[in-house]
Image (cartoon, coloured by chain):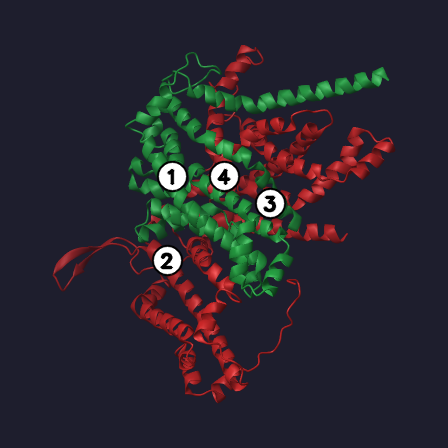
Amino acid sequence: MFNRKKKHLPPAATFREVWQKGDASFKLSFFFMGLAQLKHKQWAKGIAYLGLEVAFLIWLVFTGISSLRMLSNLGAIKQKKVVFDEAQGVYITKLPDNSVVILLFGVLSVILVVAMIGLYISNLNSVRKLYVQLRDGEHVPTNSEDLHSLFDSRLHTTLMTIPIIGIVAFNILPTLYMISMAFTNYDGKHAIGFSWTGFKAFGNVLTGDLAGTFFPVLGWTLVWAVMATATTFFFGVLLALLIESKGIQHRAFWRTIFVIVYAVPQFVSLLMMAQFLDLQGPLNNILMNWHLIAHPINFIGASANPLVARITVIVVNMWIGIPVSMLVSTAIIQNLPQDQIEAARMDGANAFQVFNNITFPQILFVMAPALIQQFIGNINNFNVIFLLTKGFPMNNNYNGAGDTDLLVTWLYNLVFGQTQRYNASAVLGILIFLLSATFSLIAYRRTNAFKEG
Amino acid sequence: MTSYRAQRHLSLALRYLLLIVLAVIWIVPIVWIVLASFSANDTGFVSTFFPEKYTIQNYVDIFTSTQFPFVYWIRNTLFVAVISTILSTFVTICVAYTLSRLRFHFRKPFLQIALVLGMFPGFMSMIALYYILKSFNMLNLGGLILVYVGGAGLGFYVAKGFFDTIPVAIDEAAVMDGATKWQVFWHIGLPMSRPIIVYTALMAFIAPWIDFIFSGIILSASGNSKNYTIAYGLYNMLNGTLGKSTTFFTQFIAGCVIIAVPITIFFVIMQKFYVSGITAGADKG
């Protein structure tokens, strides 16, 4: 029922016709939303439209226009300065305008204006509908019918209003705000008053003083994402096969042991793992007692070998990640059709051949979209790096990043570390977005091609 | 024949051996965390696997500590968790149901916008959220609740996957009998989705207990550790300004164990749902 595509019909009347042939209330509705509805006793609708327009205009006059105007230069005064006030005859200190707040309210104003335009269009559509109903002598919905439709044909409006307000306020507004921040010079030196600088911050990251950090960190991020996704997936499948193999008893118990590791909150398990792997931690202690090593290994400390540290984070990530992919592959394995495997066995295939040619490709096929999601998740895998190594060991050739830092932890350092390059962090956010979007797009096309072929 | 049987026994024994070795490797660090929480030790460091001396003093201390108001942290987190669970579950279920069962103009664009928004790293918007809450004087637990609830509208994928599996024929039958869409939602959709409501609620409930980043940025502004939630409080104990004194390390571990145990049990019980969440996304491609 849902898959049927609606054909696009031309509207029953053009706006021009409504304007020319409608009575005065229709004409006025083009300026004062809701008047036509009010005249035809659709009180709720009319009052809502009119009230929102009045509220919008009041807001626009009192704060909207000024915050939109300020958006053009993010506040006139950029530096703290002392000026002579002639009226009072004294020197006064003028503080710089707070560009952070100006930008925030500017973006908010733009969103409100866009929302108002959307509302205006919906008003026009509603007016047109009313016009057509009157013209064709159809039944004009009464006030109570309108209200009832909110629980029937327009239930989606009722259910989505609050969530959409939340999404706009806590997702869209912050995202737009940060995107615009990438085009300013907001950093430690311009912490209060900053201004638009176009693509300069992008230049800094891609070719300027941060390029020497950006490209190596990007490279490691990609290596990390590939390795982390591939290892957890591959070994997760193997572990699932091991637990599901013939003769193993108490499967739920074995699975639970592995799941426990994943279930422990990451800030506990990873912070403690960092202690466990410490130069003087238990692991080195155990290995020394067993005479496996002569000197403690510096796995993840500030002066660790970069390669050792990188391998360590990948291994620790396997510790955390394999249980999840084991669980998922178990669910898939249990649903795999057995006939192919039986047939292959009959033909004399050994366990490895069955795995390599039947089981694994089938799991891979089902898992492909989830793997892409995991890959993107790993590009943004903040917890493992931040809690385990904090980006250490430090790299002197990098600007505010260490050898195990990913783009996303570097982004965090740029904001909350000592460098305070807010605009650069926003640029990084946009670049990470482009990276994720590109991979999703490629993957999406690939998996579609897969299905058709 | 006997050789075949012997071979099979050997194979099973080897597989059991491998499984046991892996299980031990996996569980050892967790066991160590629990053991370390019982170790009598004030060096700020636990460098042996088995504690030299066992004590429950750490658990007593963490509850009575004046420097780290652990009880306040639990109370704050419980407050945030309960309210945000109620609101977030409502928001998530509404969005998921609407996107799955109702057809309307804005549906496709909404799904696309949600997809795009999800690709921006969450940290990017943290500074913005900080200033938004600051300009409304909301750098407190209330603001934290708003952030969690505000994000709930985009976490609809698992629940939507669930609603997608309920046959549409049931809805159609109800509509035939004259039910409005609201009645279908209220009397048919919601009762049938009890498992997914429980799952969504539990996930929303757990989130405040394990989130140390957002809560840290929002709550640290007050500078009063009595306002923290537990995850940030504990994290701060080890890394914050106060926490440089690692004398409290074993107390920190005890605190971690206290909150990790219930969360771990929750997760182990809910693992089936978790899997169906991931594969539900996978099926749709």
Give the Cα distance between marks 3 and 2.
33 Å
Give the Cα distance between marks 4 and 2.
28 Å
Q: Secondary structure at mark 3?
A: helix
User: What percent of the width, then of the height, locates residue B61?
Assistant: 33, 23
Instruction: State whether discs 4 and 2 lie on one chain.
Output: yes
Q: Mark 1: which amino acid?
A: Leu
Residue ID for mark 1:
B78
Q: Mark 3: which amino acid?
A: Gln
- Disc 1, disc 4: CB below 8 Å? no
Colour assigned to chain B in the rendering is green
Mark 4 vs mark 2: in front = 4
Q: Is residue B218 left or right of residue A134?
A: left
Q: Secondary structure at mark 4?
A: helix
Give the Cα distance between marks 3 and 1.
31 Å
Mark 1 vs mark 2: in front = 1
Q: Front-most of B127 and B24? A: B24
Q: Which chain is red?
A: A
Mark 3 vs mark 2: in front = 3
Q: Secondary structure at mark 2?
A: helix
Q: In the rendering, which numbered label is found on residue A382?
A: 4
**Number of other residues with Cα within 10 Å of mark 1, as a class: few under 14, some 14 to 19, many 20 or more:** some
Q: Is residue B88 above or below residue A336?
A: below
Q: Chain of mark 2?
A: A
Mark 3 vs mark 1: in front = 1
Residue at the spot 40% in from the left edge and 35% down from the top edge? B231
User: What percent of the width, then of the height, locates residue A311?
Assistant: 58, 29
Residue ID for mark 2:
A103
